[in-house]
Amino acid sequence: LVRLRARLARSQSALGRGLLELLSRDRLDDDAWDEIEDTLITADVGVAPARAMVEELRTKVKVLGSRGHDEVRALLREQLLIQVGADMDRTLHTTPHGERPAIVLVVGVNGTGKTTTTGKLARALVGDGRRVVLGAADTFRAAAADQLQTWGERVGAEVVRKDEGADPASVAFDAVSKGIEDKVDAVIIDTAGRLHTKTGLMDELGKVKRVIEKRATVDEVLLVLDATTGQNGMRQAQVFAEVVNITGIVLTKLDGTAKGGIVISVQRELGVPVKLVGLGEGPDDLAPFDAEAFVDAILG
Ligand code: GDP
């Protein structure tokens, strides 16, 4: 956890430094407030949340007696915690129901880190002594199933796969069936993220979900979003949210961007909490999202 914090801090603290510097200026005129808003928007906080935050800060600064570094930092911390949703429920539903495994569906556009996240999540569960089956429901690229197979071998999880071009829903069904028969704790299904057309995606994912539900309820639908793609990623996220009922967001590649503000905009846009963050390519580079640690990383 210390290592994760350090990694977050390195990439995120530029935002905090900028904001603290601006807020500590002797004269906070309109230009200064505009700059603060721009700084937030540049960090992908999103226009509406950035405005709301500036309004709040303006009001608070007015009633603040002295404006020393500690006061400004405390004020900013309070506002960031509100925006980041410090009180959101981020429970990851990966606990089995009696003998039934928990079912997790991993969705998102190709390249965002779906397969890697599936592997890392399996690793974390196996590390906790759980048994996991992985389903390679991205049957459009043979490489995707191979990649998942490699992860399975690496972390000690069985992988259910079929030939390239097989029906993704049938792979998902078989993975769930295998998980039930073997009485494992969790089945995690990696899906294809072909955003060719919205109806195409809807048909594919909808069918996967419907078919799984013949055997078990889906406990968690995780949308994987690449933090480095900014507003473009946000648009993709919206399409997925229209197609399936997302229960949690995984924000990947947070190690490679200073634009952590996307946490704020995506939660606000989708009304769904960020539950996990990806902080690298290795098997242990997945962490539960911790709002306080995140805000403290921003503030340095
Ligand atoms: P998919 O197409 O959505 O399944 O994406 P992949 O899982 O194949 O990931 C695409 C690339 O992103 C790979 O090179 C991964 O190693 C890399 N990647 C995934 N998650 C992270 C992360 O949290 N940080 C970094 N730096 N790279 C990541």
Image: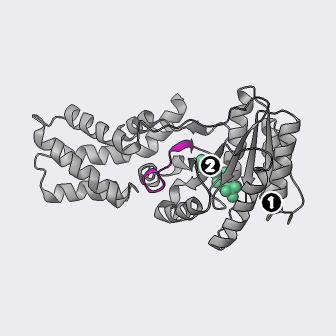
Magenta part of the protein: which range?
267-279
Q: Is residue 151 left or right of residue 91?
A: right
Q: Name the foreground residue: 238 vs 226.
A: 238
Q: Is residue 291 above or below residue 146?
A: above
Residue type marked 1: Pro
Q: Which residue is mark 2?
A: 222
Q: CA distance from mark 1 to mark 2?
A: 17 Å
Q: Does the numbered disc 1 mark a residue whose Cβ is under 8 Å from ligand 1? A: no
At which x and y percent is residue 196?
A: 66, 73
Q: Which residue is mark 1?
A: 168
Residue type marked 2: Leu
Q: Is residue 166 left or right of residue 81?
A: right
At which x and y percent is residue 184?
A: 81, 33
Secondary-structure class at tag 2:
strand
Q: Quadrant of residue 121?
A: top right
Q: Name the foreground residue: 64 vs 143.
A: 64
At which x and y percent is residue 280?
A: 60, 44
Q: Quadrant of residue 21?
A: top left
Determine crowd level at label 1: few under 14, some 14-19, many 20+ residues with C-alpha closer than 10 A. many
- Which quarter of the rendered picture does the N terminus lie within? top right
